[in-house]
């Protein structure tokens, strides 16, 4: 028997997502609203952040390939849509990076290998464990999009703002999709144990992630 009930799992799972949404919003506001924020600082953050877009193409492809027979057709096709949108996000942001003289990432940032490795480990457990992980991760970003869009325009990056307007709309769908999959497919004690393990680990990785991409300004 699982150490926690299904009801207890969802209470904790949703609490982790709310905590991460609040943490992400706080870190984003402190970073993006600074009067002395430079475009260089923005693109340093974006170079790290954009990796998550292409990483989810790889993760979702693996999930679809390994588990599609355990999922209903509409779930599979929704995951395919999700995967395509992540690829599109990577492409449009990388075009902006390159336009401004920066390089599109082609490997995971060294400081985020824990986040990367957790997803691969979760994919090996069952059909829904990795969904619990990426749903916590993606849901946490939903509180940051308006902050990013507004302040990209404020500092003269309307092209990047337009990218995040697209991403904002898509990520709302991704967050709902992940929640739906977790609700539908986390059913056994083993599923519950795997999913809460993933969510708890992801909480630690996302706090590190936001601390890294949105570092506190050093006071000289």
Image: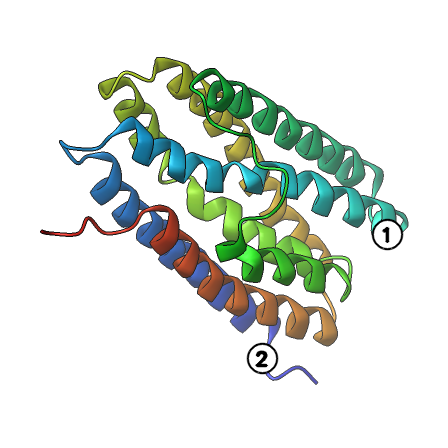
| Image height of 107 relative to 204, above or below | above
Q: Residue 144, located in which quarter of the rendered image?
A: top left
Dividing the picture into quadrants, the one containing residue 187 is bottom right
Compared across the picture, whether 133 is left or right of 24 comes to right
Element type where label 1 sits in the image: helix
Q: Taking 192 as reference, is 102 left or right?
A: left
> Extreme left residue here?
220
User: Pointer 2: what residue?
Assistant: 4
Vertical placement of residue 45 versus 190, above or below: above
* 190 versus 34 height, above or below: below
Please indicate, yes or no, whether residue 183 appears anywhere in the rendered image.
no
Crowding around mark 2 (Cα neighbors within 10 Å: few <14, some 14 to 19, many 20+) is some
- The disc placed on residue 17 is none
Q: Is residue 138 above or below residue 90?
A: below
Mark 2 → mark 1, Cα distance in angstroms: 27 Å
Identify the residue shown where x is 47% and y is 68%: 12
For residue 66, which numbered disc appears in the image? 1
Helix, strand or loop at mark 2: loop
Q: Give the image location of residue 39, x and y in percent.
A: 30, 27
In this rendering, position of residue 45 left or right of residue 95: left
> Residue 191 versus residue 216: which sits nearer the camera?
216
Residue 219 screen position, x and y as percent = 11, 52
């Amino acid at each position: 028997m699982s150490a926690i009930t299904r009801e207890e799992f969802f209470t904790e799972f949703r609490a982790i997502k709310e905590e991460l949404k609040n943490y992400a919003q706080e870190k984003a506001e402190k970073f993006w609203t600074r009067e002395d924020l430079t475009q260089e600082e923005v693109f340093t953050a974006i170079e790290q952040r954009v990796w998550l877009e292409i990483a989810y193409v790889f993760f979702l492809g693996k999930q679809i390939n390994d588990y599609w027979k355990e999922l209903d057709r509409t779930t599979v096709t929704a995951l395919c849509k999700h995967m395509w949108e992540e690829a599109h996000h990577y492409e449009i942001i990388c075009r902006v990076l390159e336009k401004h003289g920066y390089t599109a990432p082609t490997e995971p940032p060294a400081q985020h290998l824990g986040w990367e490795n957790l997803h691969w480990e979760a994919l090996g457990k069952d059909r829904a464990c990795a969904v619990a992980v990426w749903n916590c991760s993606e849901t946490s970003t939903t509180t940051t999009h308006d902050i990013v869009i507004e302040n990209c325009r404020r500092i003269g990056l309307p092209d990047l703002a337009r990218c995040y307007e697209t991403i904002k709309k898509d990520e709302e769908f991704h967050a709902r999709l992940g929640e739906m999959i977790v609700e539908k497919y986390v059913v056994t004690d083993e599923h519950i144990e795997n999913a809460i393990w993933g969510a708890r680990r992801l909480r630690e990785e996302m706090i590190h992630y936001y601390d890294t991409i949105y570092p506190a300004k050093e006071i000289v």
